[in-house]
Image (tube, helix red, strand yellow):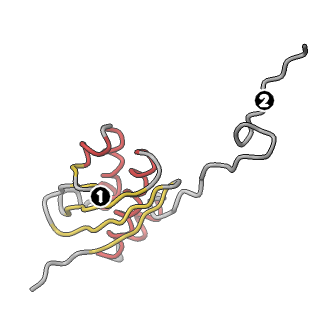
Amino acid sequence: MAEAIWYGTGHRKDAMARVWIKPGTGQMTINGKTAEEHLCRTGLVRMLNEPFQVTGTEGMFDVIAKAEGGGLTGQAGAVRHGIARALVAADEEHRTVLRRTGLLTRDPRVKERKKAGLRRARRAKQFSKR
């Protein structure tokens, strides 16, 4: 019989992650590297474990993720969102817990567009009286 694999897509800022989870020992692979190698910061790696901690499924699933776009923080948030969605695909009972903690909600904050006559979205040229 084929092994069960569940899929979830996550987004954060400009980052997008495709996440597959399968029964295993808790290993995380992002873009062919371990989570620690890819993200380089323990805080970001801890962030990836939140969906598992909330649902009580730590160490029960292996994670394989492909993350694109954005920076490391955005990619970590996208992978976390994808893990939460994949957990719901694996067991619908996780939905209420993940929804209550806000892990299923896509963070809508994105970079504001640059405006004409300014250097960035809100940064104006330096003012000089003389």
Left or right side of 108 for 70: left
Left or right side of 5 for 17: right
Residue plotted at (32% across, 43% down)? 39
Residue plotted at (70% across, 39% down)? 120
Query: Which amino acid type is marked by label 2?
Result: Lys
Which image quadrant: the C terminus? top right
From what the image shows, is residue 100 above or below residue 128?
below
Residue plotted at (40% across, 64% down)? 97
Count neighbours of disc 2 (C-alpha within 10 A) and say few if under 14, some if 14 to 19, many if 20 or more: few
- Circle 1: element type: helix
Which image quadrant: the N terminus? bottom left
Q: Position of residue 102 (x, y in %)?
A: 48, 59
Of pointers 2 and 1, the one earlier in the residue sequence:
1
- Circle 2: element type: loop
Q: Position of residue 53 (x, y in %)?
A: 30, 54
Q: Position of residue 22 (x, y in %)?
A: 20, 69
Give the CA separation, mark 2 to mark 1. Answer: 47 Å
| Nearer-the-camera pick, 112 or 24 | 112
| Nearer-the-camera pick, 2 or 53 | 2
* Furthest residue toward left: 1
From what the image shows, is residue 61 above or below residue 43?
below
Query: Which amino acid type is marked by label 1?
Result: Phe
Q: Quadrant of residue 108?
A: bottom right
| Nearer-the-camera pick, 21 or 129 | 129
Left or right side of 41 for 129: right
Q: Position of residue 56 (x, y in %)?
A: 26, 59
* Furthest residue toward top: 130
- What label does residue 52 carry, if any? 1
Q: Say which residue label 2 marks.
A: 125
